[in-house]
Image (spheres, grey):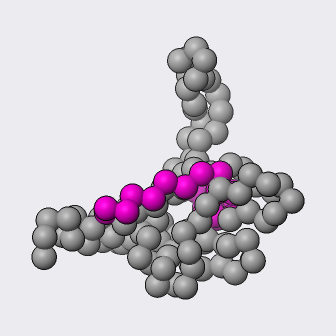
Amino acid sequence: MGLREVAATDLAKIVENIDTGFGWDITLTNPAGTSIPLKGVSDDISQAIDPDTGVMVSGRFASVGLVMQTIYDAGFVLPVGISDSSQRPWLVAFSDINGFPYTFKVSESNPDRMLGLITCLLEAYE
């Protein structure tokens, strides 16, 4: 096994392990409404950088990192951002560290096909 395969295996263990890694319960729902439970990393930060001024501003930046092979194994394709508001988006749901649940829509997805991790940038969704 080459170094890249070892790194991908290690990454999956870190991202999906809820006992000794950074794993967190995350639900991914495709536009057809089918959901799968996953383990991954998530963040939901209340500060952002204004791209025009470079100054920190109050805002919301949320994302998840998911192992691509686990998504494929569940029979899903990789999530993507859907900008057409007449179509149903990919949804991601997880709870914060205090147990409060949140649902987001995928606004952008960035797959790392070399290590097998997809990072999804999220927007609040109701």
Q: Position of residue 97 (x, y in %)?
A: 53, 56
Q: Quadrant of the N terminus?
A: bottom left
Viewer-side residue, 47 vs 8: 8
Residue lying at 66% horizontally and 79% vertically, measured from the top left: 35
Q: Position of residue 18 (x, y in %)?
A: 40, 70
Name above or below for residue 15 compared with residue 73: above
Left or right: residue 72 versus residue 1 is right
Residue lying at 75% horizontally and 77% vertically, measured from the top left: 32
Left or right: residue 48 versus residue 88 is left
Q: Position of residue 104 (x, y in %)?
A: 68, 57
Q: Position of residue 80 (x, y in %)?
A: 61, 61
Viewer-side residue, 47 vs 31: 31
Q: Which residues are magenta?
A: 91-115
Q: Is residue 98 magenta?
A: yes
Name above or below for residue 87 compared with residue 30: above
Residue lying at 59% horizontally and 41% vertically, measured from the top left: 61
Quadrant of the image occupied by residue 88: bottom right
